[in-house]
Amino acid sequence: MFDPTDLLAQDRDHLLHPLQHPQTHAAPLVIKSGTGIYLQTVDGRTIMDGLSALWNVLVGYGRVELAAAAQKQMTELAYCSNYAGLANLPAIELAERLAGYAYPDLNYTYFASGGAEANESAFKTARYYWKRLGQPGKVKIIARQDAYHGVTLAAMSATGIAPYWSMFEPRVPGFLHIVAPYPYRFAGNVQPGETVGQAAARALEEAIVQEGPETVAAFIAEPVQGAGGVIVPPDDYFPRIRQICDQYQVLLIADEVITGFGRTGELFGLNRYGVQPDILSFAKGITSGYLPLGGIQLSDAIKEAILNAPPAQTWMHAYTYSGHATCCAVALANLEIIERENLVDHAGQMGARLLAGLHALADDFDCIGNVRGLGLMTAVEFVADRDTKAPATIAGPILKACLERGLLTRIKGESLLLAPPLIITAAEVDKMVEIVREAVASVAH
Ligand SMILES: Cc1ncc(COP(=O)(O)O)c(C=O)c1O
């Protein structure tokens, strides 16, 4: 018989987890295996994964095909340096596959190992670009409140969720935050005749003007803010953002670490708005989490700036694991699954079903103030009072009640986040909504 006691003691004594605090790690689930959208714990429970691990396991667990791709590549060449002067086959093939894949103007890829590394690369490349163009003062990065861009020092400084900063201050200078395009709780001011989307975009213009366009390198935005609570912008927001960036010569960095590769029901998040970024950050879904991989894609103009540089202005950015052969081979196999199984369209269909189910829940429970989502990226926000929108204090107990009923996910504030693997079936979507219904009923009565 398996005795979990030793394992938990060893975990407690020796393993520091992300966001570690004894209170949130008092009784960790120890996961042993996974199949489809389900996880199995060492003590024999089967749990539906309502957040695709950390939004990333797009094709679900237990894909032998991805293991086989890794084994084949590891046997041939697991890894070698990808620094200038060297290359490997899977990295070349993946970069070629990704050329124009997300957006027609993005044809040049640099690989990292995850989202924060991708964003660090994006910030540095934005600064590099302006220096190459003779504008070395353009260094600031504008981000948004409730943004999540990772937690390495510069990424953390772009992240707009204060608890990630407080014990690690000071932040990197030159990062500032504007209001989020959060229609349910818009913190900006809407002028007469203006939409929320226009007002939220105006905040960018005002920030650029106030800082001085000659000091601003880039604006970074998630197409749908994920960890900040699944904040879906109004449809007129990003087209206006693009215009403002063009007008003031500010690069637009799309952080598609969550929204890339189908999550929103489009291949990439900004596709919906007909907007192209200058720099794209990706990670998570490119390998469905089977191995760590991230990166950036660069516009043709930025590519030219790198390729035409004199040696003294070389793009001196590097990671040991950039273009990791096995990670790239697994990514190629993962993209094949996403395409073969038509998971992008499927995410759109299942997302619509999930959203409809959650809206029906809102009809039955006054404690639900807002339901929102795009594709398989959804949230239910709880309030104490629908009219005043005063936040409730029930998301924690509801999260616990979900887990007791076999559904694992996360909350942000009073919002319950749901973003299951893209392979979820209609019956599983209905089951997930049913569990949430029971969980809400058990807490809110
Ligand atoms: C939008 C976004 N950007 C960046 C990151 C950071 O990625 P990583 O944890 O791989 O550094 C995340 C992680 O959740 C994310 O959601």
Image (cartoon, helix red, strand yellow):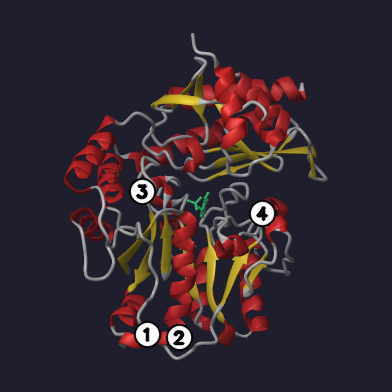
Residue tagged by mark 4? Answer: 164
Residues marked 1 and 3 touching at CB (< 8 Å): no
Left or right: 51 as drawn, with respect to 395:
left
Amino acid type, mark 1: Gln
**Would you call the spot at circle 2 few (<14 residues within 10 Å), some (14-19), or many (20 or more)?**
some
Left or right: 124 as drawn, with respect to 18:
left
Residue occupying the point 52% across, 64% down: 238
How far across and how far down the image is residue 248, in percent?
A: 53, 82
| Mark 3, secondary structure of its residue | helix
Q: Nearer the viewer, mark 1 or mark 3?
A: 1
Left or right: 187 as drawn, with respect to 277:
right
Residues marked 3 and 4 touching at CB (< 8 Å): no
Residue occupying the point 78% across, 37% down: 392
- Earlier along the polypeptide chain: callout 2 or callout 1? 2
Q: Nearer the viewer, residue 415 or 342?
A: 415
- The residues tagged by marks 1 and 3 sit, at their Cα atoms, a distance apart of 31 Å
Q: Quadrant of residue 339?
A: top left
- Ligand 1 near label 4 (Cβ, under 8 Å)? no
- The residues tagged by marks 3 and 4 sit, at their Cα atoms, a distance apart of 26 Å
Residues marked 2 and 1 touching at CB (< 8 Å): yes
Q: Is residue 321 above or below residue 351?
A: below
Residue tagged by mark 1? Answer: 313
Image quarter of the C terminus:
top right
- The residues tagged by marks 4 and 2 sit, at their Cα atoms, a distance apart of 30 Å
Residue occupying the point 59% across, 25% down: 8
Label at residue 286: 3
Residue tagged by mark 2? Answer: 131
Q: Is residue 193 above or below residue 366?
A: below
- The residues tagged by marks 3 and 2 sit, at their Cα atoms, a distance apart of 31 Å
How far across and how far down the image is residue 398, in percent?
A: 69, 28
Amino acid type, mark 3: Ile
